[in-house]
Image (cartoon, helix red, strand yellow):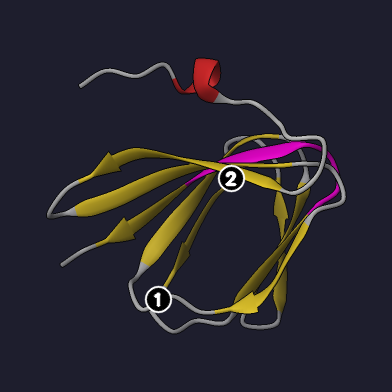
Amino acid sequence: MNKNIRQLIEYPQDGILSKIILQDEHFNITLFCMAKGTAISNHTSTKPGFVTVLEGQGTFNLQGKNILMEPQIFIAFDKNAIHSLKAEKNTSFLLTLANK
């Protein structure tokens, strides 16, 4: 499977647009496109995963620690880790969750 991720990036006027890139027995990979000013409040995941920032700028808060979201930043987290996000500019990232 080949997909040009850049061609899939599109920002909504507000809020979040998500697109499933890959879903199989090993991984779920989703492209998230967050409009400037959009936030996702504290939440957890039942699976470990990581975020790969593609474009934009924002803040990823992981367990109370702020991490700058900018292109090429990679953020790994364990299952049940409390995290939140805020997009200061239009921001896109890949979220990869492990299924096993």
Disc 1 element = loop
For residue 42, what is the image quadrant? bottom right
| Residue 77 position in % (x across, y down) | 45, 70
Residue that badge 1 annotates: 78
Magenta-drawn segment: 87-94
Q: Is residue 96 magenta?
A: no
Cα distance between the residues tagged 1 and 2: 17 Å
Residue type at mark 1: give it: Asp
Residue 38, horizontal then vertical, whole percent: 80, 53
Disc 2 designates what residue? 73
What's the amino acid at mark 2? Answer: Ile
Q: Is residue 31 above or below residue 69?
A: above
Residue at 51% across / 79% down in the picture? 44
Name the dominant secondary structure of the magenta segment: strand
Label 1 crowd bin: few (<14), some (14–19), many (20+), radius 10 Å: some
Q: Earlier in the sequence, mark 1 or mark 2?
A: 2
Q: Residue at x 38, y 62 (%)?
A: 49
Q: Position of residue 7 (x, y in %)?
A: 52, 15
Q: Is residue 25 left or right of residue 15?
A: left
Q: Is residue 88 magenta?
A: yes
- Residue located 71% across and 39% down the image: 91
